[in-house]
Amino acid sequence: ETPNNVRMEDGDNTDQTDSAQDALSSLTVEETNQEDNADGNSADNENDTSANPPPQAQPFSFQFNQPPAAPDNGNDDDDDDEGHPDLDLVDQNEFLSLLPKSLLPKLDKLKSLHNAREEIMKEYLLERAKLEARFGAMMKPLYEERRKIVVGEMDEVFQKEMEEEEKRKKTPSGETDEGGENNENVDVEEGVVEEEGEREKEDEEFVKGIPQFWACAMGHFDVISELVTEDDVDCLEFMTDVTCDDFPDGTGFELKFHFSPENPYFTNTVLTKRYEVPNLLTEDEPILKNVTGTTINWKKNKSLTHKEVTKKQRKKGGRGAGQIRTVTKRERTDSFFHFFSPPKMPKMEDVLDEEEADAVEEAFDFDYDVAQAFRGHLIPKGVLWFTGEAADGLDDEDLLEGMEGVEEEDGEGESPFPPPVPGNGENQECKQN
């Protein structure tokens, strides 16, 4: 039919009506042919399923560092190509909601197995702590005897043994040796006689103990030696022993540095450094809970960590302008004894930028590495570090094993221990050389 609102212009109305009807008929025939062709193609596709198989549901799968993909429900999503957020940004409950329900009871069972293992590990750590304490107690008498030798308390025993050895070397006159020849007829070269005479003179000067035993041992361990200055060596000569006591439950240890009462530098006879490490007996990266040092009571004008510097200043303005006054400042100096003033643990409310946080982490790492150098190397193998044999038998990788904070630095002479925070009376303008 012709629409009622069609307007006819410039021609016979009857002829125009016939032409419109013919055009409508032609359109109807073309639409019918297109529908027939579509039906035929659909039938052909249904018969030929091998060429174009129907789509199947995608299996459930995981992606590395991403939450599991939800099963494909056939709906197209324009955001599929954007990927999923990292697991760290996905709430645990949201992650579990993406898992098939059939996995949930299996995960619950795995968690119960994990909890059972944790209980066994707790028992293991307690038993290991007892074992460490048992064998540590067996080693203490050996360390105590070492201390006596180092400080000279057993010198009389060694003198007596040396005298007996000299007597055995001297064969009585007229007695034959193993070759059957008379010793009186043995020609001795003049140079040999003189050499023996010089040795006897040297033996007359019996050295007390082993001077600078621990200072020398520390000097052969790079991580520690870079902290020790020449002035420190004079003070360390009075160090008589270094010991380590592990906590009974295996959650930390305490280093003790023993000094002679004759030490002219400070009044303390023992300097301690205490480390609380809950996972000390595991292979995981150590977690420092707390570190406690010792306040050193320096004798007058004997401090090795600070020095007093006297400067003259001229008053610039105001009353008494131009007058010169003398000002004494306390400046920080490089010294091994800063080791007993550990870095401060940041408080929860402290806000640190990235650079400050890295500096604090580096300071704690180095501090712990020094502690482990004493605990794991110098204390159990003191004599080998004194002679240098321990250093010769280990390469750099062996020494740095388990010491994550040790890194090579481009600068030299800069103390790895941070200066104290402002407000404690230290001169913050004075930089370390």
Image (cartoon, rainbow, N blue to C red):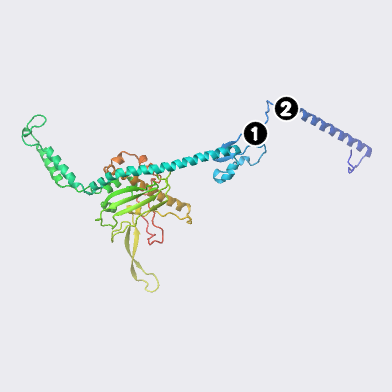
**Mark 2 and mark 1 in contact (Cβ < 8 Å)?**
no
Looking at the rendering, which quadrant does residue 175 occupy?
A: top left
- Please state which amino acid type lies under the numbered disc 2: Glu
Picture coordinates of residue 104, whole percent (x, y): 58, 39
Where 367 sits versus 111, above or below? Answer: below
Lateral position of residue 310 relative to residue 121, left or right: left
Q: Which mark is residue 46?
A: 2
Distance from the alpha carbon under mark 1 to that under mark 2: 20 Å
- Please state which amino acid type lies under the numbered disc 1: Ala
Whether residue 287 is visible:
yes
Q: Residues within 10 Å of mark 2 (few under 14, many from 20)?
A: few
Lateral position of residue 144 relative to residue 103, left or right: left
Q: Nearer the viewer, residue 4 or 40?
A: 40
Residue at x 81%, y 30% (from the top left corner): 33
Q: Quadrant of the N terminus?
A: top right
Residue at x 68%, y 30% (from the top left corner): 54
Picture coordinates of residue 330, whole percent (x, y): 34, 61
Name which of mark 1 and mark 2 comes first in the sequence: 2
Picture coordinates of residue 90, whole percent (x, y): 57, 45
Q: Which mark is residue 57?
A: 1
Q: Which mark is residue 285?
A: none
Picture coordinates of residue 17, whole percent (x, y): 91, 37
